[in-house]
Image: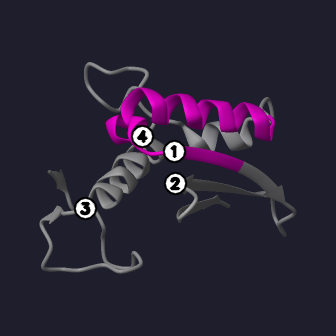
Amino acid sequence: MELYIKTIGDPNFDPLKVHSNGEIAQLITQIETVLFTNKREVLGKPNFGCNLEDLVYSLNYNNYQIKERVDQQINAYCPLAKKYRVSAEVNFVKGTVRDIAYIDITIDSKYLLQVYIN
């Protein structure tokens, strides 16, 4: 059982839910947790987390390197990713102030989790 971590403003937010029922919902929760956690924020797991802001805007990483980091984190810290086929793709588009990174995570070619860093 995974705790329900969606907040007001998230798509399909349900204020009455306490935990996620389906495995896909649980996997999405695991992936979101890994993506939005910075390294050294989890006590006892200093390598847990993607550090997305740092990866995207440090200017030292290209989209392939960011994809590899996301894949590595998902494989290491999302147990349900071993049961389902999970793939990530990273693209950059020109923004007005700075470039925008889109991270698309596909689960079993059916479900898409899209994150953008602006």
- Circle 3 SS class: loop
Q: Are the two marked residues, 3 and 1, in contact with CB atoms closer than 8 angstroms?
A: no
Q: Which residue is mark 4?
A: 81
Residue 108, numbered circle: 2
Give yes or no for residue 67 being in the magenta stretch: yes
- Circle 1 SS class: loop
State which tag comes first along the sequence, 4 or 2. 4
Left or right of 58, for residue 45: left
Q: Which residues are magenta?
A: 62-89
Left or right of 88, for residue 17: left
Amino acid carrying label 4: it is Ala
- Circle 4 SS class: helix
- Circle 2 SS class: loop
Give yes or no for residue 85 being in the magenta stretch: yes
**For the residues marked 3 and 1, what is the alpha-carbon distance in whole angstroms?**
16 Å
Q: Which residue is mark 3?
A: 22
* Residue 111 percent location from the top left of the image: 51, 64
Amino acid carrying label 1: it is Arg
Q: Which residue is mark 1?
A: 85
